[in-house]
Amino acid sequence: MATITEVLARPTYGASGIWSWITTVDHKRIGVMYGVTAFIFMLLSGIEAGVIRTQLATPDTDLIGPSRFNQMFTMHATVMIFMVIMPMGVAFFNFVVPLAIGARDVAFPRLNALSYWIFLFGAILMHFSFIVDQVPDAGWFSYANLTEYPFSENLGLDFWAIGLLILGTSSVAGGLNFVVTIINLRAPGMSLMRMPVFVWMTLLTSILLILAMPVITVGLIELVMDRNFGTHFFNPTGGGDPILWQHLFWVFGHPEVYILILPPMGIVSEILPTFSKKPLFGYPFVIFSGIVIAIMGWAVWSHHMFTVGLGPIANSVFTITTMLIAVPTGVKIFNWLGTLWKGSIELTTPMLYALGFIFLFIIGGLSGVSHAVSPSDFQQQDTYYIVAHLHYVLFGGSIMGIFAGLYYWWPKLTGKMLNETLGKINFWLIFIGMNVTFFPMHFVGMNGMPRRIYTYAEEFGWGTLNLLSTVGYFIIFVGILVFIYAIWQNRNARRVSHDPWDAPGVEWSISSPPPAYNFAEVPYIRGRDHYWIVKDEAREAGNPITEPEAAVDPRSIHMPSPSYWPIIVAAGVGLIGGGLLSHYGVSFLGGLIAFIGVIGWSNEPAAEPEEGH
């Protein structure tokens, strides 16, 4: 058993120290790196949110001006979506999926490593904009013409567009990897309808990534061309159409919502059976409702555009499709409640977060139904009612689900349990703080407070509720500090068994933390809740399982050799950053070509195993 510090220091395939982490292709280490990186960006984004909330706490505040306010909310939203929630999901994909399907690694370990480094350097590149004080300021959806010359000469929007292009490359590479991994590397006996729900949600999310990211890639390339090379895709003075950007963005943007929420749904679907001590109720319905959500997510994008003048036919069609997509979501909720019904419920910290997810996501879903009705959406559009809805779905949903997963799989990662008392304090602070922050926004929104304003007059009467929202932010802030302290205290925590939750998944049958090779012997999956079946049979035979699978000499199992692509990726992104900082087109193009070039080499064959391995 090892602490997180020991896990981080553990040699991989004969290497040790920081270099072993830079060159690793171990899916578990890559998952840890995704998670740590995303958490750091969450802290940065949280600070930006604090600036926003402090500015809006009282009327006529002049803590920051309108330009800086626009920069803060643009980067807060962009970072939370693309550098926190998405990579946190990928962190769970990396760490959990190969273990949950009985595999020794992902299908393409080096491509997996490359996708992480592309993500990291893309995120850093976007933050280069702070160096030259040219921070993006057009919102996370950067509507044309806010991004077009001559309307905006903010160089930060180039960092934003190129950074998202690089992040999208990482997402597509990861999505392809996990689709192949799940389809081809499942252990014998694990049919599609025996896969854990989390694995199913990973598969659906990966497919959405592969299909959705190219749409926004087209839009971003056109935006970069408009801003730097004189084209007019979105500039009406040159015959372009700014509404084209909205269509491209939201055709990507609404599948993106499900990219953000399906992984937490999968996490919750693993946690509820474990702590209800009964199988997931209606497993096939949960799976097929996820499939329907993934398909219907492509048919609702224009509900973001009810107010742009698409006409009554388009508005009616997208009103109907948006209402219909609530049906499979409701199916999931009723199946989760059915799992809880008459279960032997244990209110552990992961369970509390899972229950909090259900409660808050229901509120977000109900406010979403009100947006589906296009006449009422005309009143709600671009008000703080939308901000409230968005955060109940993506904070109350995605972030709560992510915390549930962190507490649930932490013993598997480290071999030690996060403190339950601190965990419960952490949950209640974040749960209460989230509601205090975002629930009042429904009312100020319906009272007419528009989003994206940096201050307001006292006569509007929004001051009290805005102050309450700011108090809620600081409650969340304290909750995050408690979580950080829980991680710090974890270095002295007691060691736990390989299966502390008595969980049903095959990943709990091996040691905690898992060995580099995961499984000494690839398991044969006995059923949907494999490890429960194995443990029940062992108990009936009078030999209850108390120890994990026996360890073997790692040298007896061939594993892929290290990857050195981070150096090449760093060089490519450095050239891109240099080109943007100098705003010199040739350097920019050269860097982009160098960056794209490394992708073709990412699947270099691993070294041949030594004889007998």
Image (cartoon, helix red, strand yellow):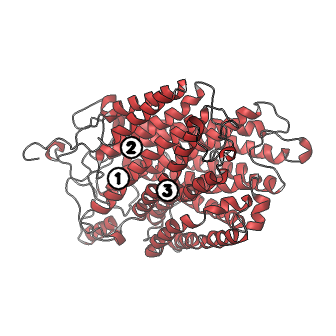
Residue, disc 1: 177
Q: Pointer 3: residues within 10 angstroms few (<14), some, or many (20+)? A: many
Judged by depth in the image, the label closer to the viewer, 3 or 2, is 3
Q: Is residue 334 left or right of residue 313?
A: left
Residue, disc 2: 115
Q: Quadrant of the N terminus?
A: top left
Front residue of this view, candidates 282 and 413: 282
The residue positioned 81% from the left and 57% from the top of the image is 446
Secondary element under disc 3, as helix, strand or loop, is helix
Residue 508 can be seen, yes or no:
no
Residue 327 percent coordinates (x, y): 59, 73
**From mark 1 to mark 3, how far is it between C-alphas?**
16 Å
Residue 276 percent coordinates (x, y): 48, 67
Q: Earlier in the sequence, mark 1 or mark 3?
A: 1
Q: Is residue 492 left or right of residue 361?
A: left
Secondary element under disc 2, as helix, strand or loop, is helix
Q: Which mark is residue 212?
A: 3
Residue kind at label 1, given as amino acid type:
Asn
Residue 453 can be seen, yes or no:
yes
Q: Earlier in the sequence, mark 1 or mark 2?
A: 2
The residue positioned 37% from the left and 49% from the top of the image is 95
The residue positioned 72% from the left and 58% from the top of the image is 308
Q: Are marks 3 and 2 in contact (CB under 8 Å)?
A: no
Residue kind at label 2, given as amino acid type:
Ser
**From mark 3 to mark 2, how far is it between C-alphas?**
17 Å
Q: Are marks 1 and 2 in contact (CB under 8 Å)?
A: yes
Residue 91 percent coordinates (x, y): 43, 47
Secondary element under disc 1, as helix, strand or loop, is helix
Q: Are marks 1 and 3 in contact (CB under 8 Å)?
A: no
**From mark 1 to mark 2, how far is it between C-alphas?**
10 Å
Judged by depth in the image, the label closer to the viewer, 1 or 3, is 3
